[in-house]
């Protein structure tokens, strides 16, 4: 499973944040590592110049072998909360899709 992390220039965290995301994806999607071929994570600060509530966004796209990609988005006040929320959503989506495929 390939994991790619992309962020706009307003999201701070560097290598540490990238490592956090990669570890979280590997652990969270471990049960589906044979089905998921690639995960792309997009981090952004939607209104960086103003600040505000829930303006940090994490979008995760998971590609399941032989199917169209799944994508989820989560907004939060801090980037870790956005990542964690989007991770919960993508795990649920992947689980549901894989279970439907089995049936």
Image (cartoon, grey):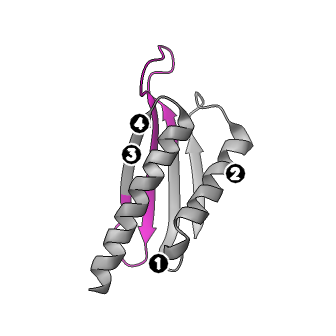
Residue 76, percent across and down?
Answer: 44, 33
Within-10-Å neighbours for mark 4: few <14, some 14–19, many 20+: many
Within-10-Å neighbours for mark 1: few <14, some 14–19, many 20+: some
Within-10-Å neighbours for mark 3: few <14, some 14–19, many 20+: some
Q: Which mark is residue 35?
A: 1
Residue at position x 51%, y 61% in the image: 39
Q: Which residues are magenta?
A: 43-70
Q: Is residue 103 visible?
A: yes
Specify which label sits upstream in the sequence, 3 or 2. 2
Specify which label sits upstream in the sequence, 4 or 2. 2
Residue identified by numbered label 4:
75
The residues bearing labels 4 and 2 have C-alpha atoms spaced at a distance of 20 Å
Q: In the figure, 97 relative to 70: above or below?
A: below
Residue identified by numbered label 3:
73
Specify which label sits upstream in the sequence, 1 or 2. 2
Q: In the figure, 31 relative to 89: above or below?
A: below
- Determine which quarter of the picture holds residue 2: bottom right
Q: In the figure, 57 relative to 27: above or below?
A: above
Specify which label sits upstream in the sequence, 1 or 4. 1
């Amino acid at each position: 499973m390939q994991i790619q992390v992309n962020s706009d220039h307003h999201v701070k965290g560097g290598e540490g944040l990238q490592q956090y995301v990669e570890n979280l994806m590997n652990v969270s999607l471990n049960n589906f590592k044979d089905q998921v071929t690639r995960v792309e994570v997009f981090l952004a600060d939607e209104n960086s110049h103003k600040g505000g509530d829930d303006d940090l966004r994490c979008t995760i796209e998971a590609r399941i072998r032989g199917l169209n990609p799944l994508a989820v988005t989560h907004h939060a006040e801090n980037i870790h909360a956005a990542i964690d929320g989007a991770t919960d959503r993508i795990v649920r989506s992947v689980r549901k899709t894989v279970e439907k495929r089995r049936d």
